[in-house]
Image (spheres, rainbow, N blue to C red):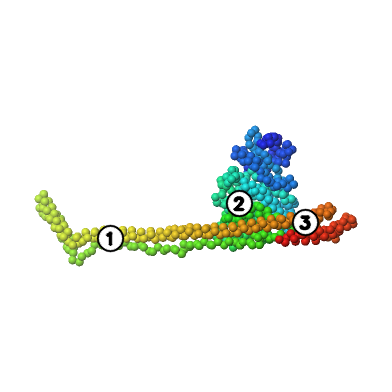
């Protein structure tokens, strides 16, 4: 059953189908049934979690602040929001014009999908005229993006083939406008919510984050160039295999982050395999090659080197055949790739420090010195003899053992022990023992001091690599600062040169346009007296081409062409030839300044 909702600004009720015909990450699309005035539009209804107050305010802002959009036979290249949608005062979404056609993705690969091949066969890369047709589509897309950027308020951010609808006649429609970023006077009013990595510039992998920071218009310039490259060659501009050490960057995101554009003049020797579709790049006119190189190579670090949408308009527009267009200064004086001073690398292998063998053996344990004339042996024999004789005297004597005998025995033992002790401590070896202990203590202290000194030495030597690393880091920091200053100065000079050339390019383009207007006026004036109604099919041709067409038509007429018709064509040919002679003279005058 159809659902009834209300438009926020118009205040009228509309009916939408009960089932969506398409869905995305944020909402669903519904056809509008009534009233008839809105049947050419569709309603986008957000999912409940996306129906925030902030989103409702953003939709209201976009509706009230549309850009100046050019119309071509009623077709709008940017599908802008028309009105907001409510249900019982609850914000639901918005309505917008219905974009007919297919997603641009069908033209961004080597082959057109089988389901589209019948309608889009002439756009196949195998067709000889396909490149010119695709360049016209690029022109239409660039024109649409230029209309958005001209406001200086809006940045698309998520510009990708999925958000561009194309018709077989070449008309395009940019959709998903509700996700744009809105900036006023350098202040972020409404952020963009998402971005697609393979169409996002290198700054996406740095500090620039959609939804958190301001995204500059240069972001869209990168996305636009990626789309054009994929359209013209059916492959991503960063698709290729690199040599070591860059071979670790495998994904497209890594290659974009590190500037691995396959046609980069500075990195051309860094690629191992460049897929064949990239070779068609060199069949492009030089000025188009320069636009891609400016975007992906020079524009990797200098964001404003990336060509604007307006520059792509001039680069992809078909050149009028009426006059010999002057060559642009940027084409006549192409700037070579800037070779910055390479950084010096310090190899740690050159400063490898071998630790010396500092394993010191401790001194051997001190052994008591034996003197040649010592009486230690005699003392021991004397003491042992006294003890033995005492035992024999106790057990062998015939008289019974008594207390008097015990006292006598103790006296003997005591006297013998005292004599032995006095004799022992009077020996030089005993005195030497204290000296030995003092020496041992002294050696121990020396061992500890030596071990501490060795340990300190080892630690100092082990700290040398860290000191070297700190020195290298200090060198690299200083070198990086110097090289960065050099790059800034060089970029300033190059930037001034390119600004100068771009200014001269604009002057030449303006001059060419003025000449074209004058030549067209001359042609119109010369042919105003001639009746061209009979040959409407040549009305779009310039005057010289009209004469050639008439000659061929008269020489090879169709079977149903009457004699009177051919006679009138012959008279018209003569009149155009006379006008052509005057035209050539006047055209030369216009071009001679």
**From where the camera sits, is residue 46 visible?**
no
- Indicate the quadrant containing the C terminus: top left, top right, bottom left or bottom right: bottom right
Of residues 407 and 286, the one drawn nearer to the viewer in this rendering: 286
* Dot in front, 2 or 3: 3
Q: Looking at the image, which residue is at 60% across and 54% down?
A: 304
Horizontal side, residue 437 vs residue 284: left or right? left
Q: Which residue is mark 1?
A: 443
Of residues 423 and 159, the one drawn nearer to the viewer in this rendering: 159
Q: Which residue is mark 2?
A: 218
Q: Looking at the image, which residue is at 23% across and 60% down?
A: 436
Residues at marks 2 and 3, CA–CA distance in whole angstroms: 41 Å
Quadrant in the picture for residue 16: top right
- Indicate the quadrant containing the N terminus: top left, top right, bottom left or bottom right: top right
Q: Is residue 406 above or below residue 286?
A: above
Which mark is first along the chain, 1 or 3?
1
Quadrant in the picture for residue 252: bottom right
Give x and y (percent) for residue 462: 40, 59
Q: Looking at the image, which residue is at 46% across and 64% down?
A: 350
Q: Which residue is mark 3?
A: 522
Give x and y (percent) for residue 400: 11, 51
Q: Residue furthest bottom?
A: 372
Give x and y (percent) for residue 137: 70, 52
Which mark is first along the chain, 3 or 2?
2
Q: Secondary structure at mark 2?
A: helix
């Amino acid at each position: 059953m159809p659902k009834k909702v209300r438009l926020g600004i118009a205040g009228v009720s509309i009916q939408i189908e009960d089932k969506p015909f398409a869905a995305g990450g944020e909402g669903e699309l519904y056809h509008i049934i009534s009233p008839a005035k809105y049947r050419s539009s569709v309603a986008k209804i957000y999912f409940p979690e996306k129906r925030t107050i902030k989103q409702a305010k953003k939709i209201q802002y976009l509706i009230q602040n549309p850009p100046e959009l050019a119309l071509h036979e009623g077709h709008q290249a940017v599908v802008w929001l028309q009105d907001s949608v409510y249900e019982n005062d609850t914000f639901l979404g918005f309505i917008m014009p219905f974009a007919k056609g297919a997603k641009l993705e069908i033209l961004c690969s080597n082959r057109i999908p089988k389901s589209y091949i019948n309608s889009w066969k002439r756009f196949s890369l195998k067709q000889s005229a396909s490149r010119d047709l695709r360049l016209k589509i690029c022109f239409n897309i660039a024109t649409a993006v230029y209309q958005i950027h001209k406001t200086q308020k809006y940045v698309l951010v998520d510009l990708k083939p999925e958000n561009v609808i194309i018709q077989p006649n070449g008309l395009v429609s940019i959709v998903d406008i509700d996700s744009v970023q809105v900036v006023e006077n350098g202040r972020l009013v409404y952020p963009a919510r998402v971005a697609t990595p393979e169409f996002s510039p290198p700054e996406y992998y740095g500090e620039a984050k959609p939804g958190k920071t301001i995204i500059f218009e240069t972001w869209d310039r990168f996305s636009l160039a990626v789309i054009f490259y994929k359209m013209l060659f059916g492959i991503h501009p960063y698709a290729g295999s690199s040599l070591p050490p860059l071979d670790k960057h495998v994904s497209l995101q890594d290659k974009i982050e590190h500037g691995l554009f396959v046609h980069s003049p500075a990195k051309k020797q860094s690629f191992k395999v460049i897929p064949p579709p990239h070779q068609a790049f060199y069949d492009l006119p030089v000025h188009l090659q320069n636009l891609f190189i400016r975007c992906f190579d020079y524009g990797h670090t200098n964001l404003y080197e990336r060509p604007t949408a307006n520059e792509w308009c001039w680069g992809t527009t078909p050149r009028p055949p009426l006059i010999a267009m002057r060559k642009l200064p940027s084409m006549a004086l192409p700037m070579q790739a800037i070779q910055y001073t390479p950084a010096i690398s310090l190899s740690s292998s050159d400063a490898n420090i071998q630790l010396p063998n500092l394993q010191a053996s401790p001194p051997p344990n001190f052994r008591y010195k034996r003197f040649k004339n010592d009486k230690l042996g005699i003392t021991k024999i004397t003491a042992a003899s006294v003890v033995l004789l005492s035992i024999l005297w106790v057990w062998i004597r015939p008289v019974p053992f008594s207390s008097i005998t015990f006292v006598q025995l103790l006296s003997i033992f005591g006297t013998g022990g005292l004599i032995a002790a006095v004799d022992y401590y009077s020996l030089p070896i005993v005195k030497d023992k204290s000296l030995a202990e003092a020496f041992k203590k002294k050696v121990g202290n020396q061992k500890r001091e030596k071990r501490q000194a060795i340990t300190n030495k080892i630690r100092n030597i082990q700290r040398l690599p860290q000191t070297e690393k700190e020195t290298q880091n200090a060198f690299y920091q200083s070198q990086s600062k110097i090289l960065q200053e050099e790059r800034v100065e060089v970029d300033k000079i190059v930037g001034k040169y390119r600004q100068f050339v771009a200014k001269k390019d604009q002057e030449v383009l303006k001059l060419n346009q003025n000449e074209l207007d004058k030549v067209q006026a001359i042609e119109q004036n010369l042919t105003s007296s001639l009746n061209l109604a009979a040959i409407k099919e040549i009305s779009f041709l310039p005057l010289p081409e009209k004469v050639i067409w008439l000659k061929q038509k008269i020489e090879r007429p169709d079977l149903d062409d009457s004699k009177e018709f051919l006679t009138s064509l012959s008279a018209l040919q003569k009149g155009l030839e006379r006008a052509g002679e005057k035209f050539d003279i006047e055209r030369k005058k216009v071009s001679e300044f």
